[in-house]
Amino acid sequence: MPTMEQATMEDLLKMLDPAKVPAHVAIIMDGNGRWAKARGLDRSEGHVEGVSTVRRITEIASEAGVKCLTLYAFSTENWHRPQAEVDALMHLIGIAIERETPDLIKNNVRLTMIGDFARMPQEARRRLEGCFNATAHCTGLVLNLALSYSGRWDIVAAARQIAARCADGSMAAGDIDEQTFARYLSTASLPCDCPDPDLLIRTGGDKRVSNFLLWQIAYAEIDVTDKYWPDFSKEDFLRALIRFQGRERRFGLTSEQLLSN
Ligand code: IPE
Ligand code: IPE
Ligand code: MG
């Protein structure tokens, strides 16, 4: 058996247990700027290269049997970056989505989004909407983009809807439990009853969650890699899935309890 680092794509696919592939993988795609800086390029060149990574990771996630891939593409806090970078990113996101739509359809991938859609620029909204509609019939991988998204935004938006229902009398405070609350989070709109993320990958080496799916990652396995997002390969993704398969998910129980179940 080759080691994980030596293994080829074919070896890695063989090492993967199809019965234990995480249904929902979420990724904090970080390191585009540092990747560009290391090459003396503008940060925006890193974002352009990052789009190619999105393409290949979508392909391999689909091939590996992942049901839902949530990609953190732009956070609520990212609106505070220099305006030129925000504009370039928004333009790039719109262009890439339009360009990739035919291939998404061909590969049976459905595009969805979580985040503050209304805050996105009109051009990006138009292109996103076009892709949501064009891929709505696709039954394979759900490619879910987190755009203008933050975990706290998500929780506050849910709390507001619940408060409005309590105020109009259609819900009582005592009705609110974890399941009810989760139905008001943005992830409740995902198709195919996507479960909470099983695996959270972060590229770029930083060990933090940066306001990503705060509620939903309660029991996600976390895998941080030093590689910058533009360098993240299909093999790296498969290695993260294989490491995930070796983890014992105890959900608060003891190992002995898990074994006796
Ligand atoms: C991630 O790369 C992409 C977005 C946040 C949009 P960064 O742009 O954060 O790259 P680094 O972290 O500065 O290298
Ligand atoms: C997280 O990356 C957000 C996205 C990947 C979209 P950031 O680069 O914004 O996170 P911090 O600033 O390092 O926490
Ligand atoms: Mg970053």
Image (cartoon, rainbow, N blue to C red):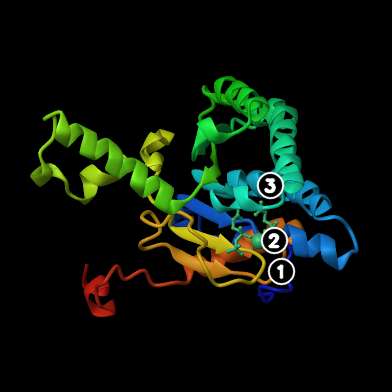
Residue for point 79% across, 63% down: 35
Residue for point 11% across, 44% down: 173
On screen, residue 207 above or below 111: below
Answer whether labels 1 and 2 touch (C-beta < 8 Å): yes
Q: Position of residue 163 (x, y in %)?
A: 22, 39
On screen, residue 42 above or below 156: below
Along the line of sight, which residue is nearer the eye, 228 or 221?
228
Q: Is residue 65 visible?
A: no
Residue for point 45% across, 66% down: 221
Mark 1: few/some/many CA within 10 Å (<14, 14-19, 20+): some
- The residue that label 1 is drawn on is 7
Q: Which element is circle 3 on?
A: helix
Answer whether labels 3 and 2 touch (C-beta < 8 Å): no
On screen, residue 157 above or below 132: below
Along the line of sight, which residue is nearer the eye, 144 or 151?
151
Tell me how far mark 1 sits from mark 2, CA to CA: 8 Å
Q: Quadrant of residue 58?
A: top right
- Left or right: 103 with respect to 247? right
Q: Which element is circle 2 on?
A: helix
- The residue that label 3 is drawn on is 54
Ligand 1 under 8 Å from disc 3 Cβ: no
The three-letter code of the residue at mark 2 reads Glu
Mark 3 / mark 2, whichever is N-terminal: 3
The three-letter code of the residue at mark 3 reads Val
- Left or right: 236 with respect to 137? right
- The residue that label 2 is drawn on is 235
- Left or right: 103 with respect to 27? right
Where's ligand 1: which quadrant? Answer: bottom right
Q: Is residue 252 visible?
A: yes
The three-letter code of the residue at mark 1 reads Ala
Tell me how far mark 3 sits from mark 1, CA to CA: 22 Å
Tell me how far mark 3 sits from mark 2, CA to CA: 14 Å
